[in-house]
């Protein structure tokens, strides 16, 4: 039985009210709010964040393949999944794959994973999907788009939901696209996009899929359907014969917006959080065609512990201003800080440190047992040379020993909160504290680690780990 | 192991005005500091047998000193130990004299910081390659004020000071240093301030505001050293070196939970060794005055305790009682310190000794303390948790 062993959605801490955007442009006030990734997040960091949560408590040595799906990978040429795999400290011989270009690539990754497991070439497969897409300022896509990520761990044993069957179609159309020259997502006329794009393809494919699966709409416990905005879901559901109130997963448009590639997996995670054994879930995505899957929830769901639920994350939030959003995305030019320019990171030095630094792995002294980061050649405590084992800090909780809110450090969102973090079980790092309210930062507060972007200089994205308040 | 005590004398010193010296080149600074020292010692440049140059950013090799002074083919060594650079240059020069390999030595520290277009130091990663040789990721976003603010936050938390109480206490240190600096014509800032001015100034790295941070300045200072037994041939009031200690930490504070950010271990240890070398039993009573590394107000507070001028946690009581004021029991930073005299990195250690030297000779003018016998200079390179500390003691 191939299916999902673990699932996790990641919703960034910040929200921007659609009313606030409309007020700025004197436009029509949209409803609800969109989830906004912090200035130090991107699709890679959100993939790591959701994956860390998804695989925590599972034997990561069983993971043979890692798929990363996004339309907004920071690099056009350079694999993100290799970087993600390293940050997650997965095995070196993991098969890493980036899927891109389509908003259904997250689902396509799941389908590929299922095939791979069925073919016997992998035990467990980790799929992560995330997006941070930009619509033109003032445009409707800017209102619609939210940021987020999701991760699914697939395998053969102890699955909480079996993937029973799949069905896909390809459908070439220029309804929504972004070329290699564009920053913002482009679209054809709205009516064409709606009628000949999403509604036609999703409805036809999902109908054909149900026929193939031998099911009627009434047999489906929950339909988890991708939808580009808050309005189209009801049209699609009605045409497919589902009852909006009882059978269709809320798209969370009002609370987080359309999170692109991540949306369908995030909605599936939300649906699984409240699913019962025996539930049949119809899962459908869209983008130049459609992938549809039938899932059946197993008894294992009763033993499954949701770590950070969608509901919890939707409730933990901080509203930001539109000005902040534009600054974070560097859509506003502003006075640069009167500080020395940041140095370009050395690719050699990054490479040397990647197996350890990128996964926040240090060492533990085999003689005196003291954990230390970064890895040392000589133990700082007992001075023993080269007697260490690997020791990872990324999954440890820590305590903030001291801190400062630094206005001088160049940042897209000053002040930069810096501090020293002491880990449970030993070890210390000095790093930034992110996703924080200044008032909540106190000496001795608990923090967990989160993978973030530190700087982008010379088109090299430099990632590491920051602390963030445990909520 | 022998002590340096009473083996080497300072027979001349010079110091330029510190500040934003837009119209002075490094050559101007070097020539002015060196010639003031030559004149003070009653020597000429040809009498110098060896020289040590301290600078962090202002050039490589001893030629930085040889060229402007036209020194003729003598040994010159460039010394760098971050902000403790000039103190370490002085130590190296003194050791050469003590070893008997040179009788008359020039030590000069210089820094030209204000040509770079911003307030603050150039990226030291670029200059020193610190992060290129170790992990690329660690703590790179921490600025100087950010590093030292960590000390303030932890100190306030440990001793139960509220944010407001702590800030007010630190402001008291800035007010004192501004009062002293106003009395020195060579200081970068020569203006008194009030507690309110300090508290209402912009926040730099919380809890440190603008007046908790020292000036970024250009400047140079110099010393002429000779064997103690020769000193009286040059002047009737030479100042003798009593102790010279450098303590370099292995950056343990960045990785060890044992370090709590409420003191600076290297300062404490350098102090212990310097007191032992100078034969000092009770520093608070025996030391007449001290020039300490107040790069930030909180640093000066921590130094009071680490150098045993007062007990752990007792700084508040001592500060508030005026113990460290110009007319207090142990005046600290009588020339305004880094806060007001300014901080040209590679020159600061010798500027500190310049004030100690003048105080010991009774030539400190309106800042002169009563009955001086021993003066201490404390110079810090690095950050809390990862420091290089110099403690020098000199006296009559």
Image (spheres, rainbow, N blue to C red):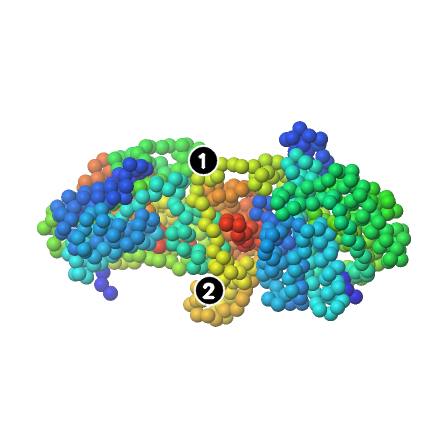
Q: Is residue B25 something one can see in this rendering?
A: yes
Task: Indicate the position of residue B6 as horizontal and vertical percent values.
Answer: 18, 56
Residue at point 58%, 61% (across, down)? A86
In this rendering, the answer to whether B292 lies above or below A91 is above
Are the residues flagged by discs 1 and 2 in contact, CB closer than 8 Å?
A: no
Label disc, if present, on residue A376 of the rendered structure: 2
Residue, far top:
A26
Q: Which residue is mark 1?
A: B202
Residue at point 54%, 52% (across, down)? A461
Q: Is residue B314 something one can see in this rendering?
A: no
Q: Residues within 10 Å of mark 2 (few under 14, many from 20)?
A: some
Q: Quadrant of residue B31?
A: top left
Give the CA separation, mark 1 to mark 2. 40 Å
Q: Chain of mark 1?
A: B
Q: Chain of mark 2?
A: A
Label disc, if present, on residue B257 of the rendered structure: none
């Amino acid at each position: 039985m191939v299916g999902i062993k673990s699932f996790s959605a990641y919703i960034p801490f910040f929200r921007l009210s659609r009313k606030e955007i409309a007020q700025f442009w004197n436009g029509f006030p949209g409803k609800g709010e969109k989830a906004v990734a912090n200035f130090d997040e991107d699709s890679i960091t959100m993939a790591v964040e959701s994956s860390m949560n998804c695989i925590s408590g599972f034997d990561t040595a069983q993971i043979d393949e890692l798929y990363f799906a996004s339309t907004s990978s920071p690099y056009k040429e350079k694999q993100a999944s290799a970087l993600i795999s390293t940050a997650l400290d997965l095995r070196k011989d993991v098969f890493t794959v980036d899927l891109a270009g389509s908003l259904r690539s997250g689902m396509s990754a799941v389908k590929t994973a299922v095939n791979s497991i069925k073919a016997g070439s992998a035990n467990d497969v980790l799929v992560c999907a995330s997006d941070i897409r930009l619509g033109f300022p003032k445009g409707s896509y800017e209102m619609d788009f939210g940021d987020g990520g999701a991760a699914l761990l697939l395998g053969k044993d102890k699955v909480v939901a079996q993937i029973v069957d799949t069905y896909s179609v390809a459908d070439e159309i220029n309804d929504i696209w972004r070329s290699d020259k564009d920053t913002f997502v482009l679209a054809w006329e709205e009516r064409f996009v709606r009628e000949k794009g999403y509604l036609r393809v999703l409805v036809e494919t999902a109908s054909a899929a149900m026929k193939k699966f031998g099911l009627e709409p009434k047999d489906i416990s929950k339909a988890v359907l991708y939808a580009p905005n808050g309005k189209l879901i009801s049209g699609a559901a009605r045409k497919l014969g589902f009852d909006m109130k009882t059978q269709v997963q809320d798209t969370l448009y009002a609370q987080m917006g359309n999170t692109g590639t991540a949306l369908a997996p995030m909605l599936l995670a939300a649906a699984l959080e409240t699913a019962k054994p025996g539930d049949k879930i119809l899962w459908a995505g869209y983008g130049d065609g459609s992938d549809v899957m039938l899932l059946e929830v197993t008894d294992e769901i009763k033993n499954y512990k949701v770590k950070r639920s969608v509901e919890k994350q939707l409730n933990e939030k901080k509203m930001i201003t539109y000005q902040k959003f534009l600054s974070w995305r560097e859509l506003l030019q502003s006075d640069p800080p009167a500080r020395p320019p940041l140095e370009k990171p050395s690719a050699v030095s990054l490479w040397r440190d990647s197996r350890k630094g990128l996964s926040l792995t240090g060492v533990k002294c085999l003689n005196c047992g003291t954990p230390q980061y970064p890895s040392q050649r000589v133990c700082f405590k007992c001075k023993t040379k080269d007697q260490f084992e690997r020791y990872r800090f990324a999954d440890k909780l820590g305590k903030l020993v001291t801190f400062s809110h630094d206005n001088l450090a160049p940042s897209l969102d000053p002040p930069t909160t810096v501090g020293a973090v002491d880990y449970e079980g030993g070890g210390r790092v000095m790093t930034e504290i992110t996703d924080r309210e200044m008032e909540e930062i106190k000496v001795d507060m608990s923090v967990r680690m989160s993978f973030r972007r530190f700087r982008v200089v010379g088109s090299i994205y430099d990632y590491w780990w920051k602390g963030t308040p445990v909520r | 192991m022998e002590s340096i005590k009473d083996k080497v004398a300072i027979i001349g010193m010079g110091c330029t005005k510190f500040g934003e010296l837009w119209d002075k080149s490094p050559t101007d600074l070097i020539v002015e500091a060196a010639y003031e020292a030559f004149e003070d010692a009653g020597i000429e440049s040809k009498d110098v047998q060896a020289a040590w140059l301290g600078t962090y950013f202002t050039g490589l090799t001893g030629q930085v000193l040889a060229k402007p002074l036209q020194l003729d083919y003598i040994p010159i060594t460039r010394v760098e130990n971050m902000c403790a650079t000039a103190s370490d240059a002085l130590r190296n020069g003194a050791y050469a004299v003590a070893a008997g390999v040179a009788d008359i030595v020039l030590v000069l520290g210089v820094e030209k910081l204000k040509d770079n277009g911003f307030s603050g130091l150039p990226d030291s990663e670029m200059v020193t390659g610190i992060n290129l040789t170790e992990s690329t990721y660690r703590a790179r976003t921490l600025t100087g004020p950010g590093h030292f603010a960590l000390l303030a936050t932890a100190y306030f938390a440990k001793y139960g000071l509220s944010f407001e109480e702590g800030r007010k206490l630190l402001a008291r240190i800035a007010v004192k240093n501004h009062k002293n600096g106003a009395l020195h014509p060579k200081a970068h800032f020569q203006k008194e301030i009030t507690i309110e001015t300090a508290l209402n100034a912009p926040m730099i790295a919380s809890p440190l505001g603008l007046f908790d941070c020292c000036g970024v300045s250009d400047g140079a200072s110099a010393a002429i050293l000779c064997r103690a037994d020769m000193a009286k041939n040059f002047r009737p009031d030479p100042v003798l070196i009593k102790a010279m200690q450098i303590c370099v930490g292995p950056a343990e504070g960045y990785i060890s939970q044992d370090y709590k950010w409420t003191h600076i271990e290297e300062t404490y240890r350098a102090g212990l060794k310097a007191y032992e070398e100078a034969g000092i039993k009770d520093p608070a009573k025996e030391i007449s005055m001290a020039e300490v590394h107040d790069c930030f107000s909180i640093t000066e507070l921590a130094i009071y305790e680490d150098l045993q001028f007062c007990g752990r946690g007792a700084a508040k009581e001592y500060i508030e009682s005026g113990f460290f004021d110009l007319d207090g029991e142990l005046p600290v930073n009588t020339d305004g310190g880094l806060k007001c005299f300014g901080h040209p990195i590679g020159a600061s250690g010798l500027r500190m000794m310049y004030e100690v030297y003048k105080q010991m000779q009774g030539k400190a003018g309106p800042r002169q303390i009563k009955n001086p016998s021993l003066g201490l200079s404390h110079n810090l390179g690095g950050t809390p948790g990862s420091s290089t500390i110099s403690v020098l003691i000199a006296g009559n």
